[in-house]
Amino acid sequence: MSTGSTPAASSARAEKTAATGASPTPAPTPAPASDALARRPLPAYRTVDLVLTVAIGVVFAFVFLAWGQVYTLFTPLQAVLPPSVGLLAGVWFLPALVAMLIVRRPGAAVLAEVIAAVLEMVLGGQWGIGTVVSGLLQGGGVEIAFLVTAYRRFTLPVAIAGGALSGILEWVYERFSYYPEWSWASAWALLGFFIVSGALLCGVLGWLIVRALGATGALSAFPAGRQWGRRSRA
Amino acid sequence: MSAGPTVLGVTAGADGTLGDAAPDGTGPASHAAVPLALDAVTWTPSTRSRPTIDDLTLHIPAGQRVLLTGPSGGGKSTVLRALTGLLDTSTGDLAGDATGPTRPGERGLLLQQPLHALIGGSVGRDAAFGPENAALDREEIQRRVTSALHAARVGLDAATSPWDLSGGQQQRLALAGSLALDPGALLLDEPLSMLDRPTARAVRAAILDVVGDRTLVVADHDADGWAPHVDRVIVLGAQAHVLADGAPDDVLEQPDPAATPDPATAPDPTAMPAPARASGTSGTPVLSLSRVSIARRRRRDEARGKRTIASPLLEGIDLAVPAGCVAVLTGPSGSGKTTLLRTILGLADPAGGHLERPEPSRIAFVPQEPEHSFVARTVRTEVTASPWAHDPGLAESLLQRADLGHLSDAQPFELSGGEQRRLAIIAALAQEPALLVLDEPTVGLDQERRTQMFALLEEATARGCAVLAATHDPDLITRAHVRLDLAEHGGTRDDDAQSASPEPAATGTALALAPATAPASASASASDTTLRPPRRPRPAPADVLNPLTTIAIAVAAAVGSFAIDRWQLGLLSCVLVAVLAPLAVRGVRSTALRLIPIALAAVGLCWSTVLASPLPVFSGTTWLLGLKEALRIGYFVAPGVLIFASLDPTRLGDALGGRLRLPGRPVAASVAGLVRAGLTADVWERIMTSRRLRGLGARRDLRHPLRSGAALVRLLASCTLALLVDAVRGTEQQALAMDARGFATAQHRTWALPSPFTRGDLVGLAAAALLLAAPWVLRTVLGG
């Protein structure tokens, strides 16, 4: 399962030696997006993939706690126009997108989002077990967008589609679990806000976060690092 | 190349035989020492155009003790990684032959930062991680854990939390984690560089004790400490070229300039100008403490239970730091250095005494991890990022002084460790502070980088800045004009440093009262190594439940809530929750903290229902509909919110992996991430704090929600990036430590503890059935 351990190493070594022979000096420009894919087979998570996916979930559980403060600022708006609560929702989908854009393996979005949800729940988030249901759906939305591309395209449009899709799935859940008594007019408005927020606060923001993270050079062990990382200054 | 004669055996202590034999004689059959070999290995990471290992051939016979040394950046860590067989071939090109281990844990690995190597939620479960990956059965796991904890002289109860231990104890625990798989070789990557000297000596002795006839490879730029204990020294230059290889005496007698700093070029320890040394009382002090006492900080596990009034950590601290003067704050971990720094920085109030310090805008702080404070896109803008840095000309000259001019367009996060420290210091100096506070400014830096650091501190004092550094660096201590030693005056010593003699000369005085919360002071013989779930400080009846029962209760209530179709039914259902609640409650305060968010959410839902329902707004019927919604959501979430306080990630992992047989690696990795979540919380707090201290905190203004909202989003985005960088950097080391303990091939791992269903679970499942059925039954009874 791991590509770093012994059993896989001998064949990998032969493969890599051949590759080195073909192009001894890698090009000094960032690789195009299509080249920066996880090594196949995709379900074969390296340990570092698993650990990072989980770590992203943990990081965002704490970001979520801080994000609650932004909700406080927007209370007056929500008090007048209840569906506007959806405007801030995109941030909840971020761990799924950030993990997927970095690790680029099936299930990364769902795992990161569920970890964030479970930790938020254990820390005392107000939605209890509902947090985990949301986590599955929000992770699922991002997951579906990248599944459709067979995990081959990790571009901004797919990221936006993933965020929007998470918004739609989360809306279905909240419409029937949290807001069943709302009029359909309000419910549709909520859906609109969810989609916009998912596209911007998750899709665009998450993509920017991963690009910034890649530029730090910290992602060199991951496909995203090969796409966004600069060549070492050395 | 010559394998030197076996020079020295174990020097540290009489009981050097502990290594392989467990004290009770039940230890695992010992595997033989293994040889390590690299044949014509060339390694080019995919982010670099030149190899970091260039055609290296290295043969280490079984049982040999080898020191790999040389300057930072020479590739010692990468060579060590190659010797461990853990180069990840998807991140670079490997040519040549680097054979990997033949069984999990054959090659044990210790890292510079022991925190990265800690995986389990308790001391025992951490030691059990490797044997679990090797799919051993429970009896064998327990035997291995007991034997390894004794051999590494961890001396802690198996249920102790590993996160609050001192660095020395954590490194011993990491050693035990390796020993539990009975390695044939131990590979150590600068295992002592984060520790103070006495602790480092003690940990080195513990390591040498257990080596026995195993192969040992130590990578360390500090050659002197290891030289007496190894058979062979290899000096690596750039791209891991072998500069020298031979017996310690042969190699180290003619020191290569790259290997050890030449005493002639090493900085003069007294070079720091000493305006205050001659006349310590000249001028008014920039910082002065008189009879200050410091309260103990609340520990993490106490935060969940009741808040206890702690006895003071330190009392009677006197310190005066005049302008242009360097003061150091010394003492082992746990002696209160961090808490005292926080107080001086204005993040905590002193419990008593008098403290005078400059205005917040005149104090600058450099955290131990400089990355935590970075906010800007380029090095140049980082220097002037603080609103208190007004002079761009000064910033430019500081960049040149710190030798960062050629990097001014680079990203701060992509700099090397030494460059990041220098950047953080000049960013602090650009604020023209009266007081510069640094936390361990030289830890982990090699001699050359430390020299650059000292030059910058001189720059600070030359500008008339008072400098205060918490440190255990002897060179920095020698250079300081004022020293406040918390240990000498009775502060707790690190358990590892008991044998150390206190170092002389303190001009400040401190008196410590009670010892700091020692994570565990039990001696090795008294500690219980039986694997068991940690006991919570304040137990609740629901703690006995299997985690799966806990989840069943939460799901049952959520499903039951859909029966609630009128407010009367909602009220009755919530009464049921209130009746059951005491089973999950561990304290009034912690329960209130969990319930208040639910109450607010319920009020919000009531209000939004009133506005958004199809019924006429603000009519009586609408309000009752809103009330019903509030009660329904309370029933939906409250049982889960209450009962999840009893959910323990480790036990959840045992249930999901051991009982439900979900895939072992994802479950174990998730548990490992969740049990260290407290560390992430600490880092998040440090990141936020470092911004506040730079004047970059957010001000919330409810009159301008958009503007302050945007400012808050910007701040959160920058903090999130810093936290993610921190997490990613730790991730690679953690994964390395896990793979060295057999995690890469642990698809069919075992779980050290069972996940039993007990009589308590029958009660729990009955409660779940009640929560599920009651609303539906009541709905039928009430009719409709």
Image (cartoon, coloured by chain):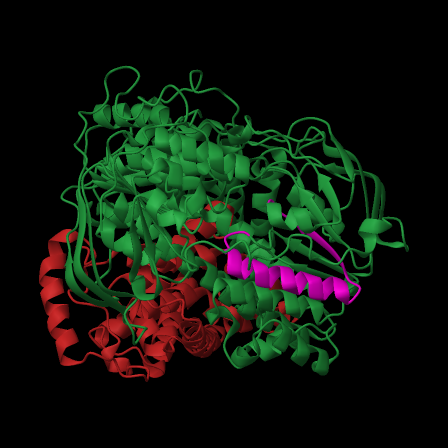
Q: What is the x, y in percent for residue B505?
A: 73, 37
How many discs mark residues in the rendered view? 0
Determine which quarter of the picture holds residue B731: bottom left
Q: Which residues are magenta?
A: B443-472
Q: What is the x, y in percent for residue B629?
A: 52, 55
Asked whether B367 or B560 is in front, the reply is B367
> In which quadrant is the C terminus of chain A drawn?
bottom left
Asked whether B132 or B30 is in front, the reply is B30
Q: Which chain is red?
A: A
The answer, for residue B780, to whether it is visible in the render is: no
Residue at 79% x, 59% y is B324
> Is residue B104 shown left or right of residue B617?
left
Q: What is the x, y in percent for residue A12?
A: 13, 63
Asked whether B747 or B560 is in front, the reply is B747
Check residue B466 for magenta coloring.
yes
Q: What is the x, y in percent for residue B373?
A: 59, 64
Q: Which chain is green?
A: B
Asked whether A33 or B56 is in front, the reply is B56
Residue at 13% x, 76% y is A21
Check residue B266 for magenta coloring.
no
> Is residue A100 shown left or right of residue A19?
right
In this view, B498 is above or below B298: above
> Is residue B246 shown left or right of residue B355?
left
Determine which quarter of the picture holds residue B705: bottom right
The answer, for residue B33, to whether it is visible in the render is: yes
> In which quadrant is the N terminus of chain A drawn?
bottom left
> Is residue B161 shown left or right of residue A105?
right
Residue at 44% x, 77% y is A208
